[in-house]
């Protein structure tokens, strides 16, 4: 007859601990992904709907976008990347899965693009400074909007990869 595991036995259980690390990383990854998606949506709405009645109203909208980028978009994307890499390291099956590595690379690309395009204070200042020149302002806003939509598409591709999990590794014979 097998006895119940003691608390000491449970503490020494690396498989159970690894399961909790994987579950924690996945949960953190999912919550941060949702936050990132919401922040992207908010940035898209502000980009499209910001009032152009006065430079003060426009600057206030851009300041709101900058705050969303600084406190939600960039940090949540950092958490998505780090928790994804932690899940990759903690799950042996992911190590040889081509889809997981592609997802990791796309995640790093999304993080870099989010930092450069939306998270940059210089970029935000350039857009506000372009307010007197409608053609330049429209060009900058369209460029930002296109990048935001590209980020949305890349995030959707990452979700599809996580759900579908296609075989992307070469077949070994």
Image (cartoon, rainbow, N blue to C red):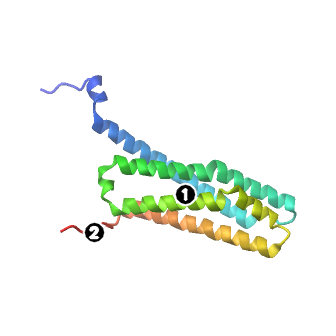
Q: Residue sitting at 39 percent across and 44 percent down?
A: 23
Please tell me whether residue 33 is drawn above or below residue 133 in the rendered image. Answer: above
Residue at the farthest left position: 1
Q: Quadrant of the N terminus?
A: top left
Mark 1 and mark 2: Cα distance apart in space: 28 Å
- Of 57 and 173, the residue lying toward us: 173
Q: Closer to the N terminus: mark 1 or mark 2?
A: 1
Neighbourhood count class around disc 1 (C-alpha, 10 Å): few under 14, some 14–19, many 20 upward: many
State the residue position of label 1: 111
Looking at the image, residue 21 sits to the left or right of residue 136; the answer is left
9 displayed left or right of 65: left
Q: What count of labels does the image hold?
A: 2
Left or right of 161, for residue 120: right
Residue 115 lies, in percent from the top left, at 61, 57
| Residue marked by disc 2 | 170
Q: Name the residue located 28 percent from the left edge and 33 percent from the top edge.
A: 13
- Please indicate, yes or no, whether residue 50 appears anywhere in the rendered image: no
């Amino acid at each position: 007859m097998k006895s119940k595991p003691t608390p000491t036995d449970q503490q020494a259980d690396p498989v159970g601990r690894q399961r909790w690390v994987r579950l924690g990383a996945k949960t953190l990854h999912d919550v941060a992904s949702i936050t990132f998606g919401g922040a992207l949506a908010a940035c898209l709405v502000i980009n499209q709907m910001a009032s152009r009645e006065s430079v003060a109203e426009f600057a206030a909208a851009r300041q709101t976008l900058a705050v969303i980028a600084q406190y939600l978009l960039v940090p949540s994307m950092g958490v998505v990347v780090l928790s994804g890499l932690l899940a990759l390291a903690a799950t042996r099956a992911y190590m040889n899965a081509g889809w997981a590595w592609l997802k990791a690379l796309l995640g790093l690309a999304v993080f870099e693009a989010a930092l450069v395009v939306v998270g940059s204070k210089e970029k935000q200042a350039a857009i506000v400074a372009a307010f007197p020149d409608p053609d330049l302002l429209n060009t900058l806003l369209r460029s930002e909007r296109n990048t935001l939509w590209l980020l949305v598409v890349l995030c959707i591709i990452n979700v599809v990869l996580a759900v579908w999990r296609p075989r992307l590794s070469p077949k070994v014979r």
